[in-house]
Structures are given as C-alpha cells and as structure tokens.
Image: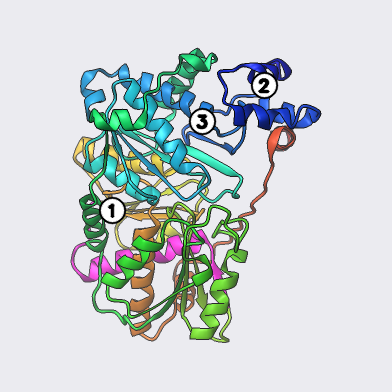
C-alpha cells in the first residue's frame, strides 16, 4: 500500500468527518505515525478485527468498522432472503466507542436489508453467543477488544451456531471488503429511522433471564459449603452484574467485590492492562482478600469471557492458578461430580486446544471420557460439538484453553466467564466441605496422574515495528525447527 497517498486522501477528502481529518492533520509531520496508521488495512480474520482506536486504515474507527460490516452483510446477502430475515445480533462491551461502533454496525446491516437485534446496554461476550442461538439469528457481532489495553477496540464476528466464524467465512468477508476501498460506497441508514421501521430492534430483557436460568442449570452439586469466602473483580468490565447475580442466586453467602473495579471504566484506571491472565491484575483483590480472609479470588476480563483464579495457601498467601491448572481441576471436578450423580455421559468428551495441558488426558481416561484436541480458538472447540450433533453420536461435556477460557455445556458456544465463575466457586465449596483446598486437590491430581510442566509468556509487539519483529522471530524459529 502507498501509505502516504492514502493518508493524503483521508486528510483531504471531505467524505471523512472533521474530527478524523483534524486528528490526521496533527500527525502530518510524524512520518512513522502516518506509516503505522496507513501501511495496511486492519486484517479481518476468524477473530474479526482488533486494533488501536483512531483515524486510519490500520485503526478501529467508524469507517473501518463500517467496511467490515459491509463485507459481513454482503456475505449474509449471498445466503438469500431467509438469512436476511433471521438477522444478526449486535452486542458491545465497556470500551471507548463500543456503543458507537455497535450502532454503526447496525446501520450498515439495516441498510443492506438485514434485520438487527441489538442490546440496550453492555453485555458479556457469552451473552452475544447465547442470543444468536436463542433468537435463531444468522450471525452476530460483539464489539470488544477483550483484554487488550484501553487504546484498543475490536469486532468479533459470529456464525449462526453462536461460535466465532471459521476461516472460509472470514476469507469471504475479507474479499468483499476489498470492493469498498471507496468508503462512500458502503451502505448506511440512520439508526433511529431503521428502528422506527422495525429493521433494528432492541433485545428484550427476558433473554437475559433465560441466560441466567441456563447458567444456573449448570449446577452439578448442591452438597457444598456455601460459606466459602469469595472476592470478585470484573476489572471495570461488563461481568459485574451477571457474575454477582449468578453467585448470589447460587446461594453463596460471602461475596466481596473490589469496589475500585466494580463499575465500567473504559480507561481501566485501576489496572492499566486489564488481562486477568497477568497476576498483577489481582493486586487490589489480594488486598481485599487478606482483609476479609477470602479463600478464593476471581477475576473476569473486560468482556467477561475469561476467568482467572487465585487461591489462599496454608500461609495465607494467594497463589495464581494457570489456565492449565484450572482446566485440569474443572475437568476432574466436573467428571467426579457427574459420576457421583450418575449423570456422566457414556460417550462424553472433553475438548481442548493443542497448546493446552495433556494432564487432562489421563484424568478423562480414568472416567472413560474421550479427549479431543483442536487448533486454538473456541470456535474450533465447538466444531467438535457441532459434529457430535450432526452425526448423532458423542456428547460435549467441557472445553478449555490454557489462556483461561472455559465452558461447560453447549448453550453458549464461546468462552463463558459467568459460567466458569459459578463452577469454580462450586468446586471450591465442594472441596471445602471435605476439608480440602484447590491446592490440595491439585497436588492429589499430580500424585495420581503425574506432574506436567507448563509456562505461558505474554509478549506485546505493536504496530509495524512489532509486525516486522514478529515475522523475523517466526522466520528464525522455522530455521531452528528444520
């Protein structure tokens, strides 16, 4: 791409709004910044779009969001009138401009004759997946950048099964997007006008009630100690209402909320990098935990699809559990509890990504349960469930990834931190009644099935420079592997 030419076009073309052009005017002497904003288009992949918010083709803004939506709309229109009538679900999180981007997406879909079902307020990612299935929509969009820093936003695209789109659909959308380098060709209709005409409609609150009931129905065991002390933080994201409600309705009596991180804050002022996979995100939770003598600390990421855990050891210190450890604990607990209840499926399966721990294999084997391995991404995990349903054989029990993503059952086909928070709390309370902590249980699992070593490192590589470093590192890795 001729980044300078495209920059000049955005700067001088009156189609682009004044705020966009003024933002670009301020960087006219910063060649590196111009290049970073315009050297490429935001790539549309199986995870949709993700990037820094700002003006430019390599940024999340009203134009790049509209372009992606037009590509998605063209893909749906290709399916015919029935698909357009089924419509799409639009959901958004707490991030800067998420509400705006959700409305822009709605306007583009509506202008293309596709019905839109949109939430009135912020919702967790799993609710988006649930709504698509419940409303029998043809697809959906979740406006979120998950756990990225505050400067970012994103756009997750979903198929009719409630999972994120697969590679073939992503390629189709990307190809359609190439037809709209002239942004003025993108169709849009006024949001309120489309609402008045019934093309756009708000999703009724009863859907949330249905979701809550489904999560509560995931209860496996009532013979637990509900006095367990739990500290919860939504990290200023959108998990607060639903996680607290679920734990309350589940009967847990001692739930403590990190007040500084209770309410939505798109700047994530108390944590900076709102990734619960990073133990530093637990700083305020640990302080509150020590004050109230909590046994379990829970943290959900901004869009509440991932759940992290710390537990108190015998010295009163809090120990961070990795995604692999939680996945192993949950697998062992779910299978144990189902067996005790005589409800363990004969042809049940646990599904994990290939980069997640193999410890789950001997655990599952001891219960007569198969383990399926798939490529990274819950869309691949739930492809196994889809295949089971297609052939009428096999039952999905539980899926997980080492990146603290988990889900039990299939009514949501993405990671679900609301469901996970409830099950982790239930599991903790179950073992507490037996006089054991999760650390005790984990040690027993190691003793029975073997010790498995694992480590995850998070490396941030931003912009053009980061992309070049990543490509260089990948090339060197390939040489070493050959």
For the residue pair 246 and 316, the one nearer the viewer reads as 246
- Is residue 342 one of those drawn in magenta? yes
Disc 3 versus disc 1: nearer the observer: 3
Q: Is residue 364 left or right of residue 443?
A: left
Query: As displayed, is residue 144 above or below residue 397?
Result: above
Q: Residue at x 20, y 22 (%)?
A: 82
Q: Residue at x 39, y 50 (%)?
A: 122
For the residue pair 400 and 16, the one nearer the viewer reads as 16
Instruction: Tell me where residue 18 sits by quadrant.
Output: top right
Task: Of the two numbered discs 2 and 1 on the same chain, state the one appearing first in sequence.
Answer: 2
Q: Secondary structure at mark 2?
A: helix
Query: Residue 264: x and y, percent?
Result: 48, 58
Query: Residue 209: x and y, percent?
Result: 22, 56
Q: Which mark is residue 283?
A: none
The C terminus, quarter of image? top right
- Residues under labels 2 and 1: Cα distance? 50 Å
Q: Secondary structure at mark 3?
A: helix
Which residue lies under the disc numbered 1?
409
Query: Residue 328: x and y, percent?
Result: 44, 62
Q: Which mark is residue 11?
A: 2
Magenta segment boundaries in residue numbering: 318-347
């Amino acid at each position: 791409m001729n980044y300078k030419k495209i920059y000049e076009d955005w700067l001088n073309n009156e189609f682009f709004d004044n705020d966009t052009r003024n933002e670009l005017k301020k960087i006219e002497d910063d060649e590196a910044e111009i290049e970073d904003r315009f050297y490429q288009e935001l790539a549309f992949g199986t995870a949709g779009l993700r990037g820094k918010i700002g003006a430019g083709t390599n940024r999340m803004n009203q134009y790049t969001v509209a372009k992606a939506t037009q590509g998605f709309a063209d893909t749906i229109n290709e399916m015919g009138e029935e698909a357009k009538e089924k419509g799409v679900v639009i959901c958004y999180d707490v991030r800067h401009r998420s509400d705006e981007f959700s409305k822009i997406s709605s306007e583009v879909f509506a202008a293309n004759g596709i019905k839109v079902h949109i939430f009135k307020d912020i919702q967790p990612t799993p609710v988006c997946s649930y709504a698509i299935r419940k409303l029998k929509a043809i697809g959906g969009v979740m406006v979120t950048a998950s756990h990225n820093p505050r400067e970012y936003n994103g756009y997750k695209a979903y198929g009719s099964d409630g999972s994120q789109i697969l590679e073939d659909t992503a390629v189709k959308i990307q190809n359609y997007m190439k037809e709209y380098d002239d942004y003025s060709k993108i169709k849009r209709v006024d949001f309120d006008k489309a609402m008045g005409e019934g093309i756009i409609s708000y999703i009724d609150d009863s859907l949330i009630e249905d979701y809550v009931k489904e999560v509560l129905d995931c209860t496996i065991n009532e013979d637990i100690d509900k006095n367990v002390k739990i500290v919860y933080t939504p990290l200023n994201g959108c998990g607060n209402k639903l996680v607290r409600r679920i734990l309350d309705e589940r009967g847990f009596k001692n739930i403590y909320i990190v007040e500084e991180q209770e309410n939505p804050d798109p700047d994530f002022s108390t944590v900076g990098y709102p990734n619960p996979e990073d133990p530093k995100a637990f700083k305020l939770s640990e302080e509150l935990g020590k004050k109230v003598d909590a046994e379990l600390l829970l943290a959900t990421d901004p869009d509440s699809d991932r759940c992290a855990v710390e537990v108190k050891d015998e010295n009163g210190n809090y120990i961070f559990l990795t995604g692999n450890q939680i996945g192993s604990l949950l697998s062992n607990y779910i299978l144990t509890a189902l067996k005790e209840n005589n409800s363990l499926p004969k042809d049940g399966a646990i599904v994990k990504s290939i980069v997640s721990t193999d410890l789950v294999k001997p655990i599952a084997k001891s219960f007569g349960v198969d383990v399926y391995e798939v490529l990274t991404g819950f869309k691949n995990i739930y492809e196994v469930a889809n295949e089971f349903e297609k052939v009428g054989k096999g039952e999905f029990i539980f899926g997980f990834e080492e990146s603290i993503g988990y889900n039990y059952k299939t009514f949501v086909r993405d990671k679900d931190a609301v469901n996970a928070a409830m099950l982790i709390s239930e599991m903790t309370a179950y073992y507490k009644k037996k006089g054991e902590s999760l650390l005790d249980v984990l040690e027993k699992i190691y003793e029975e099935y073997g010790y498995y070593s694992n480590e995850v490192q998070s490396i941030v590589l931003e912009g053009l420079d980061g992309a070049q470093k990543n490509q260089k590192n990948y090339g060197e890795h390939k040489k070493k592997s050959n």
